[in-house]
Amino acid sequence: MEFLLTCNAWLESIAKKEIITAWWEIKEVKDRLVFFTWNDDLIAKINLWSRIWNKLYIVLNSKKNVDNFDKLYDLVWAIDWKKYIQTNFPIVTKATSLKSLINSTPAIQKITKKAIVDKLTNKSWALVREDSSLPAMEIFTFFIEDEAFVLLNTTWETLHKRWYRDDTWEAPIKETLAAGLVLLSNWNFSKPLLDFCCWSWTIAIEAVMIAKNIAPGLTRFFAFEKWDFIDKNLMKNEIELAKSKIFDKKYNITASDINPEMIEIAKQNAKNAWVLDDINFQVKDLKEYRKEALEGSIISNPPYWIRLQQDDLDVLYKNIAIIFDKNPTLNGWIITSYQDFQKYIPKNKFKNRKLYNWNELCYFYQKISTFNK
């Protein structure tokens, strides 16, 4: 059988590298999707260790030229659902359709659920009980160019949810993207790292977790952990192994913000992630860094939302440009959708690449000097 992993657009290169580094054999790569052969051990390993991917699915069935609902019903019916659907577990169906004749997601979800229930009850119209206190079995039907995939979500909530963040505050950057920025930067762990707008506290936390080799899934639960057909010892063993691989080292990582309230939230999140003592948190205005000689690297996600006035944004990004100009050996990476930033930085000293922060198109600006080292 196969696994399917999903990731954010423009992060495919480092996401694919993550798979290859872990010796998972890739079968096929599509836009934001990677298929590969699976075994039970990988269910625990990937969910626990993946820093970039969104969700891990088991491919239960797939077929090309599924261009009507009868074919979809047959595709779903062919699966041995009694093997996967546990008694009283809620059955949740989700769907996405891209460039396909069948494009009504509500209809796809309805047909998928009907085929599952019919198979479980042998079309006897018996009631399938669902206990809402149990974690849902999420079935995802995915269409692309009339090829249909019936998938079982092993992850539950998307992997960017590490469960260390206080959910009463919405982080402006996903944990998976923050980890991706750190990996794309090729930050040298022996050098200082600064995030001078840590209202996006995730960058500093993810940097520590990468440097110390802390598995990003250690603080959360996954759907497969409740499944009878997956060995319960797999996750237990993988967690113990992951804990034994954590590096007991200190790194020079600073996270600052002008807002004291944001710093307190960042501290609580770092505590939840077990890295509070690894980050130097400071209440500090970004413009104060104009007076300092900086070394190492900056990775930051400055404000750019419309709730900020244009004049404030101009001053903020001018100060960032000045900081880089006064510190020519400083490595720097800035992610923002504020396109006027290009007015304040010399084009011959910066490169950029497209990235999506949630659903917003951003640019990740990188000092060219970084590539020459």
Image (cartoon, grey):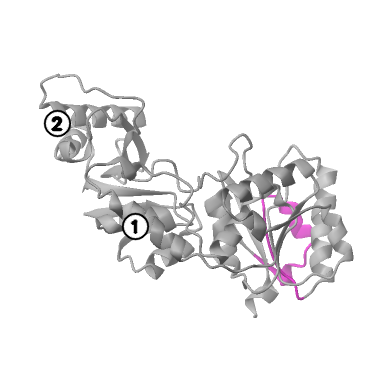
Q: Residue at x 75, y 41 (%)?
A: 261
Q: Which x, y percent locates residue 118?
A: 16, 27
Q: Nearer the viewer, residue 309 or 234?
A: 234
Q: Residue at x 68, y 43 (%)?
A: 265
Report helix, strand or loop for mark 1: helix
Residue bearing the label numbered 1: 237
Position of the C terminus, as image quadrant, is bottom right
Tell me the amino acid under the disc marked 2.
Lys
Tell me the amino acid under the disc marked 1.
Asn
Q: CA distance from mark 2 to mark 1?
A: 35 Å
Q: In this rendering, which labeled residue sits more in front, label 2 or label 1?
A: 1
Whether residue 101 is visible to the viewer of this picture, yes or no, is yes
Q: Nearer the viewer, residue 271 or 206?
A: 271
Whether residue 45 is visible to the viewer of this picture, yes or no, is no
Q: Which mark is residue 227?
A: none
Q: Residue at x 28, y 24 (%)?
A: 130
Residue bearing the label numbered 2: 119
User: Looking at the rendering, which quadrant does residue 107 occupy?
Assistant: top left
